Image (cartoon, coloured by chain):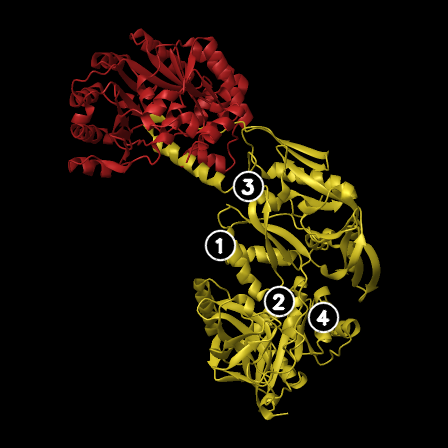
Chain colours: A red, B yellow
């Protein structure tokens, strides 16, 4: 296989956003121990790291790491031929000094969560910045010579109107990012938003409005030359995230750090989510995995992942991989889904229509054995 | 009369539902001192757990009580349980056939209700001594003196010295036992005559086979005897005889006048028919007992496995249920929509609901029941007369000369302020009033002729709802009457779904079609395409609702490569889908079938 990713989870935040369900701690005093353990874990993966093509530092808030910490981590990773190195940042912790440090380390892609241009929604979400501050940091990113960067947009916020999404789009386009990730808000269990929703304190947008918002996003961004290439990602041609494409193509990636997910030698694993379990495993010289599983149905996983991409997958590739005739083995499902306008088969490729993406869960269930 | 039989009393307890029949039965068992309250609970629970492990259920149906009366003598009281509902008059009558007397429990606050009357009529037909008892006298709203008069006036039995009790509080329960001893006649069988015993109930035990509950009229039966089931003309060797107290207790023999059970390694449940007569093979009685009229099912519906795979399990369960509920009938049928299943006959809608519930609870089966139907008598243009109980089998309109439907006579007792509501309800249900009679200044008995197909949907729910729960109902078959009936089909995504078809009066068809479409619209989740739900009479569409296409079902984030989370979410979704039934290309949840049957205020 030609591609291999490395994902490092940095599970620390100054504050927890109200909608976020990812593993993250606000006890920043633990970062020193974390860096030491992470370095220990990296040593256990030296062989797997060879041939890695992308590196992604996600979180949490990786921009909370000092440049010195990053140097330590990069030193442990060793000399690799990464073609893309991304770091997630938030507007509060990003400084010109850090950006300079990133460049020196070879980081060539920045991803910043801004979410919305409306300060009142930023407050509801528990973000620690306003839009002006975020826009200022984007200018700083560009001024520091990073032309490859992403900003995140979240839509379907409680009480949000279609007009507001239009305003967000205008504001985000004005920032000149060549890549925009858009996420429909979900109320995940264990989050503050989920609790407030259950208590009737938040009013979610209707499914209809949610889809209208997304339709507006797609139309507006594509008119600006930011093309949808994945279910929730838009980019100018050439700026697609290589690292994320590894996930969606079913290619291998090493996951490092507490709660990180990895995919190696056909196995999917999740690291310990508990910091102390993670620490103890690393100290014992064991890979700190909390769970490992072999996907029972590789065919389904292939379909599920590849159909996230707008281009879908090539039928020939499926047939080679699984030694069967996709069109024949899935005849009934394909008939139903094409009739309903959910998927299309064209030029030897299978892919979701726009409507297919809107209801992709329901559509995918049809492919399950 | 021999001294042994003079000390036996065989009796049942009859009552309107909720008047306290079961509570009184429990108190009688307790107060005869065999078991303390705690022991009783434990013992009965234990036995039920055991039965559950073996996959059968024995209700506490018949119990032998030993009671030392005030006259100083010890009596054996055989309490034979009866089912408590309007649909089960047949079963009540078969229990009563094993008795000489019946304790009639009447709620001292509510008074005589429709099933009180119905049960009294049954007991009367059997020539039983009726012992009235006023229960719930501890309630502040109890008015025992008035109710006594009511019993005397509406039923015509003397209630002056009826025991006044509270079964719940255990108050004056001994008075009931005394009344049974004094008033219920002792059995008078001939112990030396050839064996003649009535099977009044039966059930299945995995280890012992089919077990017959019997009342010995003449003669004796013991272990080792060769017996004959007279109707089946089949022979068996008795393995064990005994009685319930309240669990099974083996004894050497059962004699004339006794009530008990017989095990004879009967493998085939069909060989142990309720109503049959047991006699000795060697010295048989000349004439069998009249037995029972076979119960006639009046309400039918299709029962199908929810997932299509458990067809055989449903057959097994129905066979076992049929053993102690002979009124259930069933035969295999096939539905285009639902595949293989059974068309089952029931005594009434509640019987149907109880059987469905038992299939689900006791046999752990997921089932789909189709719309209930009655039996229509259809005269075809070629002169042939056919009985149709599955709407799918109704001939084409052009080949029908006339359709007749079963009509029942219904007694409805309601507090007088609700008379208007009930008259309106009955009129809406095409009822014709026969007469109306004031029991006292507060309560009225209304007698209506009602088409059975109007009663089986939700009449009982409607009656309860329109009388704040105070109305009571009893009905029995009257005759067949010609009627303008049509077949209403339901189409989902343009395909007729036979499981939803029903026969309705033409004046009701459009409204009912509209209602079904609305309910299915709510019950069926949105799918990937627009789904039209239509109701049609012949080729004419009379109602339509559209289920809009699904708008959104997407979870588009996948940070950090957490693929498993997404896959698990989809697996869960798949499980939910599996619980639905595929009708054509549409997934229909089980509750959609139920939703079209429910009562609605509108």
Numbered disc 2: secondary structure = loop
User: Tags 3 and 1 in contact by the CB under 8 Å rule?
Assistant: no
Q: Chain of mark 3?
A: B
Point out residue B241 in the picture as x, y percentages from the top left corner.
Answer: 50, 79
Q: Is residue A155 above or below residue B161?
A: above
For marks 3 and 1, the one nearer the N-term is: 1
Numbered disc 1: secondary structure = loop
Residue at which label 2 appears: B83
Q: Is residue B497 above or below residue B45?
A: above
Nearest to the observer: residue B151 or residue A340: A340
Residue at which label 1 appears: B364
Marks 3 and 2 on same chain = yes
Q: CA distance from mark 3 to mark 1?
A: 18 Å
Residue B428 visible within the image: yes
Q: CA distance from mark 4 to mark 2?
A: 27 Å
For marks 3 and 2, the one nearer the N-term is: 2
Residue at which label 4 appears: B143
Mark 3 or 4: the one toward you: 3
Marks 2 and 1 on same chain = yes
For marks 1 and 4, the one nearer the N-term is: 4
Quarter of the rendering occupied by the C terminus of chain A = top left
Point out residue B254 in the picture as x, y percentages from the top left corner.
Answer: 53, 83
Q: Chain of mark 2?
A: B
The residue carrying pointer 2 sits among few (fewer than 14), some (14 to 19) or many (20 or more) residues within 10 Å by Cα, namely many
Point out residue A131 in the picture as x, y percentages from the top left corner.
Answer: 42, 16
Residue A14 visible within the image: no
Residue at which label 3 appears: B589
Marks 1 and 4 on same chain = yes
Q: Is residue A274 left or right of residue B265?
A: left
């Amino acid at each position: 296989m030609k591609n291999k990713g490395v994902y490092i989870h940095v599970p620390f935040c100054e504050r927890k956003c109200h909608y976020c369900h990812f593993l993250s701690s606000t006890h920043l005093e633990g970062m020193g121990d974390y860096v030491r353990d992470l370095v220990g874990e990296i040593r256990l993966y030296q062989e797997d790291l060879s041939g890695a093509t992308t590196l992604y530092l996600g979180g949490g808030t990786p921009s909370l790491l000092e440049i010195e910490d990053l140097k330590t981590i990069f030193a442990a990773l060793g000399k690799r031929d990464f073609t893309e190195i991304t770091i997630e940042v938030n507007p509060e912790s990003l400084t010109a000094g850090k950006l300079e440090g990133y460049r020196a380390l070879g980081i060539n892609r920045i991803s910043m969560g801004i979410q919305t241009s409306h300060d009142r929604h930023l407050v509801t979400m528990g973000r620690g910045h306003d839009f002006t501050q975020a826009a200022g940091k984007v200018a700083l990113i560009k001024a520091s010579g990073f032309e490859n960067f992403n900003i995140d947009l979240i839509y379907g916020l409680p009480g949000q109107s279609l007009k507001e999404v239009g305003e967000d789009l205008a504001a985000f386009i004005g920032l000149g990012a060549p890549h925009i990730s858009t996420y429909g808000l979900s109320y995940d269990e264990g989050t503050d938003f989920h609790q407030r929703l259950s208590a009737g304190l938040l009013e979610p947008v209707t499914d209809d409005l949610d889809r209208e918002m997304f339709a507006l996003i797609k139309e507006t961004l594509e008119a600006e030359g930011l093309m949808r290439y994945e279910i929730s990602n838009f980019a100018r041609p050439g700026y697609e995230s290589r690292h994320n494409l590894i996930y969606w193509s079913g290619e291998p990636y090493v996951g490092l750090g507490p709660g990180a997910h990895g995919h190696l030698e056909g196995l999917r694993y999740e690291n310990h989510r508990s910091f102390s379990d993670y620490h103890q495993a690393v100290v014992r010289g064991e890979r700190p995995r909390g769970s490992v599983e072999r996907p029972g149905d590789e065919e389904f996983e292939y379909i599920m992942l590849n159909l996230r991409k707008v281009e879908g997958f090539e039928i020939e590739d499926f047939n080679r991989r699984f030694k069967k005739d996709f069109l024949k083995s899935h005849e009934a499902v394909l008939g139903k889904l094409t009739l309903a306008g959910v998927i299309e088969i064209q030029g030897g490729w299978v892919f979701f229509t726009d409507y297919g993406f809107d209801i992709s869960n329901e559509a995918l269930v049809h492919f399950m054995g | 009369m021999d001294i042994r039989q003079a000390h036996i009393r065989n009796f049942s307890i009859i009552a309107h539902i909720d008047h306290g029949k079961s509570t009184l039965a429990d108190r009688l068992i307790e107060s005869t001192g065999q078991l303390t309250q705690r022991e009783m609970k434990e013992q009965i629970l234990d036995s039920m757990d055991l039965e559950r492990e073996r996959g059968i259920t024995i209700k506490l149906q018949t119990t032998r009580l030993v009671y030392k009366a005030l006259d100083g003598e010890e009596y054996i009281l055989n309490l034979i349980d009866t089912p408590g509902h309007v649909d089960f008059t047949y079963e009540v009558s078969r229990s009563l056939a094993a008795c000489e007397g019946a304790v009639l429990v009447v709620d001292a606050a509510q008074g005589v209700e429709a099933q009180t009357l119905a049960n009294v009529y049954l007991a009367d037909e059997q020539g039983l001594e009726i012992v009235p008892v006023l229960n719930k006298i501890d309630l502040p709203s109890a008015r025992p003196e008035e109710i006594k008069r009511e019993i005397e006036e509406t039923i015509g039995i003397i209630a002056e010295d009826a025991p006044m009790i509270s079964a719940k509080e255990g108050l004056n329960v001994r008075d009931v036992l005394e009344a049974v001893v004094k008033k219920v006649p002792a059995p008078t069988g001939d112990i030396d005559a050839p064996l003649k015993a009535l099977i009044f109930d039966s059930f299945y035990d995995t280890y012992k086979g089919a077990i017959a509950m019997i009342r010995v009229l003449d003669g004796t039966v013991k272990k080792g005897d060769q017996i004959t089931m007279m109707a089946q003309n089949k022979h068996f060797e008795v393995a064990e005889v005994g009685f319930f107290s309240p669990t099974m207790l083996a004894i050497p023999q059962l004699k004339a006048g006794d009530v008990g059970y017989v095990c004879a390694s009967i493998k085939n449940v069909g060989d142990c028919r309720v109503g049959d007569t047991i006699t000795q093979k060697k010295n048989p009685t000349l004439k069998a007992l009249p037995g029972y009229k076979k119960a006639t099912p009046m309400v039918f519906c299709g029962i199908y496995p929810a997932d299509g795979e458990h067809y055989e399990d449903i057959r097994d369960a129905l066979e076992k249920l049929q053993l102690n509920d002979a009124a259930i009938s069933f035969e295999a049928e096939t539905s285009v929509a639902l595949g293989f299943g059974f068309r089952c006959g029931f005594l009434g809608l509640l019987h149907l609901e109880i059987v469905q519930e038992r299939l689900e609870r006791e046999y752990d089966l997921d089932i789909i029941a189709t719309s209930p139907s009655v039996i229509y008598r259809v005269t075809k243009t070629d002169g042939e007369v056919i009985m149709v109980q599955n709407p799918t089998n109704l001939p084409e309109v052009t080949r029908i000369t006339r359709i007749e439907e079963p009509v029942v006579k219904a007694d409805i007792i309601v507090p007088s302020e609700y008379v208007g509501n009930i008259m309106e309800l009955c009129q809406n249900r095409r009822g014709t009033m026969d007469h109306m009679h004031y029991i006292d200044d507060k309560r009225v008995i209304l007698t209506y002729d009602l088409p059975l197909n109007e009663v089986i949907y939700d009449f009982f729910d409607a009656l309860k709802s329109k009388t704040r729960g105070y109305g009571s109902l009893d009905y029995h078959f009257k005759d067949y009457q010609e009627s303008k009936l049509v077949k209403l089909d339901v189409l989902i995504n343009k395909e007729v779904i036979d499981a939803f078809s029903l026969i309705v009066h033409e004046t009701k068809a459009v409204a009912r079609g509209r209602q079904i479409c609305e309910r299915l619209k709510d019950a069926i989740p949105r799918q990937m395409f627009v789904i039209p739900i239509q109701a049609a009479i012949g080729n004419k569409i009379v109602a339509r609702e559209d289920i809009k296409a699904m708008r959104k079902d997407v979870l588009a984030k996948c940070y950090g490569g957490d693929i498993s989370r997404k896959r698990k979410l989809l697996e869960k979704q798949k499980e939910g889908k599996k619980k639905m039934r595929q009708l054509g290309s549409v997934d229909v949840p089980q509750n959609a079938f139920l939703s079209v049957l429910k009562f609605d205020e509108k």
